[in-house]
Amino acid sequence: MNIQVVGVVGAGVMGIGVSQNLAQTGHQVILVDVSEEILDHARQEIRNNIRFQGFFNKSEKGDSPDDVLQRIKFTTNYQFLESAEFVIENTTEKWDIKKEVYEKIDKICPKASVFAANTSAIPITRIASVTKRAAQVIGMHFMNPVPMKPIVETIRGYHTSQETIETAKKLLLQMGKECIIVNDSPGFVSNRVLMLTINEAVFILQEQVASASEVDRIFKTCFGHKMGPLETADLIGLDTILFSIEVLYESFNDSKYRPCSLLKKMVDAGLHGRKSGQGFYTYN
């Protein structure tokens, strides 16, 4: 049986992408966030994204923005998640916020519902510990932009059951994606490596070893990467990068994860990358 109704908690960059992908693959989506302003922004971003996709894929006839948006319920009321068969959580990388969300949805959602944490670094086992359904909690680390990325890093927590893994695989297949299953560890595979790379690139910039464009050009031309580490940081969001590296620093108590002071300063200054219009590069 296909999964029909999916809850999405958090309408930031990742929540927008996940909701759009789900709605475009025929799912009914319940998108929850804390304010109507955030939800209005999410609605407009999804509309813009679908139009942008249509512009570049004129040969593929897909649903109109209105058709896709009709499948998404935008709400500030968590109670609507009582009909969700599967919930994907995308809140900020702060434990206090995530803990509160999982305690709330655990009381509202059906007992059979699976919870997937779309987190960059927080251990899935820790998230599962605040629920009464630890076997039904899994990690789904989507990559940005979600609708365009075919692979999802999927994390098995200590208690995650094989049934939950199969359910997650089924949903991802319905979304047009495959998964790579890894075991639980702070940062998993992708971000344990990526965050170190980005943080070190910021140190290089701070020490004036090279400019941002020079750092990125080396990675693109020498290693064939589509984006350099600082461009990637701007895409992800410098605030998310900082939260993630802080989680790794706290989790491993290893100085190699010490956040660069320039990264902290930029986040304090509101230079969060693409979403704020200014990061290591300027965006219109």
Image (cartoon, helix red, strand yellow):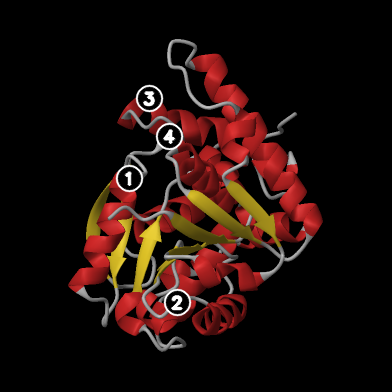
Indicate the position of residue 66 as horizontal and vertical percent values: 64, 32
Q: Which mark is residue 174?
A: 1
The residue wearing badge 4 is 148
Relative to 3, residue 22 above or below: above
Q: Residue at x 47, y 42 (%)?
A: 21
What SS does tag 4 mark? helix
Q: Which residue is label 2 attached to?
A: 110
Q: Nearer the viewer, mark 2 or mark 3?
A: 2
In this picture, residue 29 sits left or right of residue 114: right
Percent position of residue 9, x then y? 57, 63
Q: Nearer the viewer, residue 66 or 33?
A: 66
Q: Residue at x 56, y 31 (%)?
A: 213
Question: Element at badge 1?
Answer: helix
**Circle 1 Cα neighbour tier, 10 Å, few/some/many (<14 / 14–19 / ≥20):** some
| Residue 172 location (% of width, % of height) | 32, 50
Question: Which residue is at a point 39% across and 66% down the rendered structure image?
Answer: 187
- What SS does tag 3 mark? helix
**What amino acid type should be assigned to the residue bearing mark 4?**
Met
Residue occupying the point 45% across, 68% down: 257
Q: Going by the image, does 136 lie left or right of 63?
A: left
> Who comes first in sequence, dot 1 or dot 3?
1
**Does residue 29 sit above or below 209 in this rendering?**
below
